[in-house]
Image: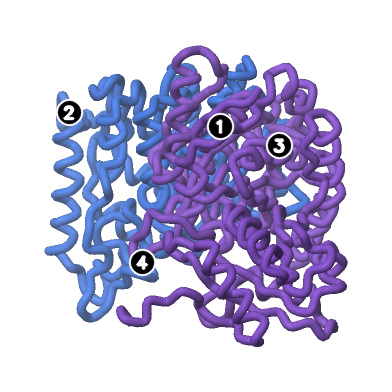
Amino acid sequence: MLEITEGSHAVAKAVKMSRPQVIAAYPITPQTHIVEALADMVADCELDAEYITVESEFSALSACLGASAAGSRTYSATTSQGLALMFEVCFNVSGMRLPVVMTIANRALGAPLSIWNDQQDSIALRDSGWLQFYAEDNQEATDLHYIAYKVAENPEVLLPAFVCFDGFILSHTYEPVDMLSQEDVDRYLPAYKPVQRLDADDPISMGMYATPEYYLEFRYEHDQAMKRARNAINKAGKEFGEMFGRDYSALVEGYRLEDADTAIIAMGSLCGTIKDAIDEMRSAGKKVGLLKIRCFRPFPAEEIRNALSHVKRVAVLDKNVSVGAKGAVAIEVRDALYGKALPVLGYVLGLGGRDVRISDIRNIVSLAESGKGDQFYGLRTEVL
Amino acid sequence: MAETCELFDCGHRACGGCGAALVSRLILKATGKDVIIVSATGCMEVFSTPYPETAWKVPWIHSLFENNSAVASGIEAALKKQGRKEKVVAIGGDGSTFDIGMLCLSGAFERGHDFTYICYDNEAYMNTGIQRSGATPYDASTTTSPAGKCSKGNTKQKKDLPQILAAHGAPYVATASIAYPSDVVKKIEKAINTPGPCYVQIHAPCCTGWGFEGEKTLAIGKLAIETGLWVNFEMENGVVTRAKKVVRKPVETYLKEQKRFRHLFKPKVNAEEIAKIQAIADKNAEKYGIDLKLKNKADPVVP
């Protein structure tokens, strides 16, 4: 059913219908509306979950870790500083192969303090072994939560997942979202059946320490699970498409890319703006297309290689920067295209909530056409 | 009971005479099999679970150094939702409990989760090589509070964590010592059977870190009690309801047995510092009323 709703509330409804048994919540802007909405649902007995009001994000994810290890489906949401505070727990949850799902309302990291959007927070956790999905709009943000649980809990995968959507730009925006019914969600996402759990009748030890004789193999198996997630995403996304008409089987998605000379690569809400810009540029005769990365972990290197086989140049837009190197997406796209004589030009933009407009996309395409890249875009040089 | 029949199995990697290993055994003797143990990083975790071996014949989880209370919170919530009856017991050393895990501990106690937190207190960070913690006693020499020409060892007194947790509204807070094993078991049984967050702090002498021979672990623990430098007590709903009374010995009898206090005796006796430590014991004795009054000086009471 189509509802006009705030992004955070749409996400909260999707979470509710995913039937988490334990939610651990801590407030942080711009994520807070999600956990507030979930608290209302619990208070009104619409959601039958234990709702733990922890004293920090660090404890939020630690509580999810415990609840997941005990065999419950769990949920938390955070952003920015909160995710940074969870850093240590993030590696632990994934290393213990616990399928926790967490929404990231993407926000910049301080200093300087900024509550506004970029994707530095989740990108900084790219090595943490979590699945990472990025939503273009609130429909996708909502649907990706069902996909995330389905993939995370797949016994072939057993990895935690971030569902990232841009703070404020999506989290606080009202737009129409086709909400599934509870019956639909129950059909798609049955109750969680843990492969292993803490249980007095079948005792196991979890989180043991590994000497150099074993550690490398643990990390290898973790990496293998992430690679297997590729198929699991294909399958879960296809099944979702067959049931509800929106197909998320691909980790990347092209827009007017088939005959493009210039391919733009981006993640998140930026993709909507880019699509509008492409439509304008196409009307003016420019062959520009978009390759949206919906799933950043596992990284879709093969999909990117295949999708870009015919283009003349690639412009990668990063709402993050690996300071001293480049935007993370540009680095990885270039790696995916290693050996191909294809210019990959990176642009770091939109950090800390700086707006990115259609005109900016046009400018970037012009820069790419003239071979200028690997730069911060949109600097106000007068304040430098 | 034969060792092999215990829930905390033999064959772990603890030092001979390890107080913490005894704590592990006593915890599982008290809880039985229907328990989930949440261990912090530390000696106990490391010596009991080198992959692929484990000494724990009950469900056991370790996550990080500082989050066992938060992990226990999540487990307790999950068990409640699933209608399961296992008890949840979090275990941490004093570094984890007094220092780095304090935030999670305070949060979990304030929220009132139904779990028991057990601190095995060996009064320093032993797993990393004997660094001072908030539980290290006054004047103890550790690798980060070494005695030296300008230092008499640790400059602070032990943090009063039982009182802090009692102030959170914990229904049951107790201290115990491995020198009195049946008392440890009794207190853990009481803690796990009291609804709400309960705390048991167990004095667990560390032969390696404190500098004494492994066969003296229990004797050292007993001397701590007998000098009043450690008090075994119980608090129910914030009120001290019971404290072990003793005929106190001078603190030197405890201090001189341990290398960590050797600088107070060699090269010469530092009477001034020993007097300060005696004052700490006297204050403990007064606070908890532990002094046994002798009826007749010629007829000493044997505690």
Could you tell me how far apart the alpha carbons at marks 2 and 3 are, in whole angstroms? 69 Å
Q: Upstream in the sequence, badge 1 or badge 3? A: 1
Write down the quadrant of residue A285 in the picture: bottom right
For mark 3, what is the residue? A149
Residue A96's spot in the image, x, y percent?
A: 69, 47
Give the number of the mark in front: 1 or 2. Answer: 1
Residue pictured at 84% horizontal, 69% vertical: A305
Q: Is residue B254 left or right of residue A330?
A: left
Amino acid, disc 4: Ala
Q: Is residue B139 above or below residue B20?
A: below
Q: Which chain is purple?
A: A
For mark 1, what is the residue? A10
Write down the quadrant of residue B10 in the picture: top right
Crowding near the residue tagged with mark 3, few <14, some 14–19, many ≥20 C-alpha atoms within 10 Å: many
Q: Is residue A366 above or below residue B291?
A: below
Question: What is the chain letter for disc 1?
Answer: A
Q: Is residue A123 above or below residue A82?
A: below
Disc marking residue A278: none
Disc marking residue A111: 4
Could you tell me how far apart the alpha carbons at marks 1 and 2 are, in whole angstroms? 74 Å
Residue A363's spot in the image, x, y percent?
A: 56, 74
Amino acid, disc 1: Ala
Amino acid, disc 3: Tyr
Judged from the image, the secondary structure of the residue bearing numbered disc 3 is: helix
For mark 2, what is the residue? B294
Q: Is residue B131 left or right of residue B280?
A: right
Could you tell me how far apart the alpha carbons at marks 3 and 4 are, in whole angstroms? 33 Å
